[in-house]
Amino acid sequence: MSSLAANQGESPQQPQPRALRLGLPYGAVMATGGAGQLAGACGLPGAARPLLWLAVAEAGWIAGRGLVRHRGELRLPPSAWARIGLPAEHTGVLTVPLGLAVVATGLSTQPGLAKVLGAAFVVLAWLSAAVFVARFAVSVTRRDGTTAVDGGWFLAPAALLGAGIAAAAYAGQTVGVLADLLRWVALVAAAVGVAGYWAVAAGAALAVARRGLGQGRRVLWWIAAGCGGLAAAAVGRVLAAVVAGATWSVAAVLAVPIVVASVRSLARTRRIVRAAPWPPTFSTAVFALGALATAKMLGVPAVTGVGKVAAGATLALWAVTAVLHASRLFPAARRRPGPAETTDRDAPTVAPSPLVPDTAPMAAPPR
């Protein structure tokens, strides 16, 4: 890190704000909130509300624990927090606005104080998205260009798309100037988010064609398919249904090699990180939501079937991942990895919290 700082013309002694580089802090929130929205489609409507409130609890717990663990870094000077690092330092934190938006959308269907809490989450989602997406965009243009593009980059347009969907959900429940404002911001978010999705997809396609998927953090490529589903859902709310169908179709095509490669890798190596990563769960969730929204607009039964299958896969992935994370709460589960396990060495910052996931690959890369 010191040599990198020196190469960039910065002092290696300058304190760096590690709080912005914590893997995927709200990955669990996104996965749980998405699973809650899909529980009804899987014939489990009774699980929707518990999962939703579990996502709210996770959001509060992760934020509170993060503030406590990094309270010393809160005293860093503004110049340290304003520093724009490499793109990899800014992708994970984009799960915060996206997680808040997913939970806000779920709370919009609840009565009373839950709806008010959801409105507050919408505001927080938009504020955090404006800051974090802007920082990421500046990082891409100033520091690294598109040479380091990976699946995590899809979180930037996804944060805008999620915030737009949350705004649209509340626009239908308000009247007057506020309703018009929410519809306008939802339209802008959908347009910019979809444009960003296609831009990142083009950059990712060029990067993969030149270098392949690489040897680290392969699990982040699940977000490519998930962001496409999210784009379809956002576009369908405020733009043309045909555009939504085309966008979801691309996401469906992207999902096939990602799932096949992951399953083949797991079957061959039978190795998984001790704390299973959340991207497959929340990416499958938003892909399913996009499929169901697209099917509702276009009236295509086959797409409905795909959406329901993806919804069932989401709940299954959530259950497995949640159990693996929960097992870390027990001392007996905290052992050194054996020969059948890999470690979290690919994560930029490994947090000991069972609710703060990492960005390590779900399966070790083939040798």
Image: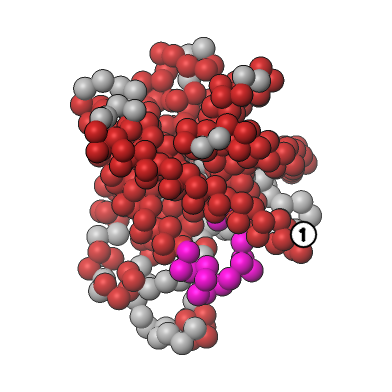
* Residue at image point 65% right, 24% down: 303
- Residue on which disc 1 sits: 209
Range of magenta residues: 137-154
Task: Answer whether residue 146 is magenta in the image.
Answer: yes
Query: On the rendered structure, is 77 left or right of 279?
Result: left
In the depicted view, which residue is nearer to us: 35 or 180? Answer: 180
The x, y position of residue 152, in whole percent, is 55, 53
Secondary structure under badge 1?
helix
- Image quarter where the C terminus lies is bottom right
Query: On the rendered structure, is 205 left or right of 178?
Result: right
In the depicted view, which residue is nearer to us: 236 or 180? Answer: 180
* Residue at image point 52% right, 33% down: 236
The x, y position of residue 42, in whole percent, is 54, 16
Q: Amino acid at mark 1?
A: Ala
The answer to whether residue 56 is visible is no
* Residue at image point 25% right, 60% down: 71
In the depicted view, which residue is nearer to us: 98 or 189? Answer: 189
Q: How are the colours assigned in the image?
A: secondary structure
State whether the magenta stretch is mostly helix, strand or loop: helix
Query: On the rendered structure, is 109 left or right of 285?
Result: left
Q: Is residue 337 above or below residue 89?
A: above
The x, y position of residue 291, in whole percent, is 59, 28
Task: Answer whether residue 259 is magenta in the image.
Answer: no
